[in-house]
Image (cartoon, grey):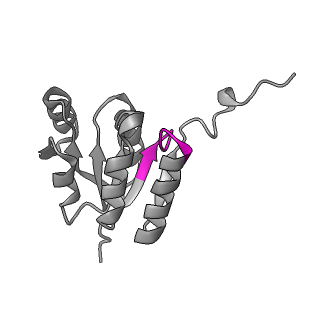
Amino acid sequence: MERRKLGIGIIGCGGIAQTHISAYQLCPDVEIRALAEIRPEARERVGRQLGVERLYADYRELLAQPDVDAVSICTPNALHLEPFIATVERGKHVCVEKPMGISVAEAQAMRRAAARAGVIACLGLPFAACKKAEAPKS
């Protein structure tokens, strides 16, 4: 019996979304199923690149898709909170780009919302394991 693929939605189709897309493409049990982006040209370009047909200007339409299990939030930093809260309240797992929020209070609210929803929330730290990003030794 074939395993069901994990359905991914991506909110925000700017530069950092390409990092998430590249990582998802390495996972055979993952399928990018929907994109949300307010800029039509970026939404259409990334949709064509991936062969994704479900493209939305409003991320809430993406969250309403029952086959989207998890979401990457790749919006500008100041725009992480609202889609994060909406994603976890829909019972979907979420990966949000760093910084999680624009304040400690915002990040704490996001953490609490994910815990209440019982979903997995992760923070994208692309350089956490990168040798070049380590602090120089004196």
Measured as percent of width and height from the top left, residue 121 is found at 46, 58
Q: Magenta span has 98?
A: yes
What count of labels does the image hold? 0
- The image quarter in which residue 19 lies: top left
- The reply to whether the magenta stretch includes residue 48 is no
Q: In this view, does 120 lie above or below 74?
A: below
In-front residue for pair 131/10: 10
Residue reaching furthest to the right: 138
The residue positioned 43% from the left and 62% from the top of the image is 113
The residue drawn where x is 31% and y is 30% is 14
- In which quadrant of the rendered view does residue 50 lie? top left
The answer to whether any part of residue 9 appears in the image is yes
Would you say 9 lies left or right of 94 here? left
Q: In the image, which residues are magenta?
A: 95-104
Q: Where is residue 97 in the image (x, y as percent from the top left)?
A: 45, 41
Quadrant of image for the N terminus: bottom left
Left/right of residue 13 with respect to residue 102 in the rendered view: left
Look at the image and tell me in which quarter the C terminus lies.
top right
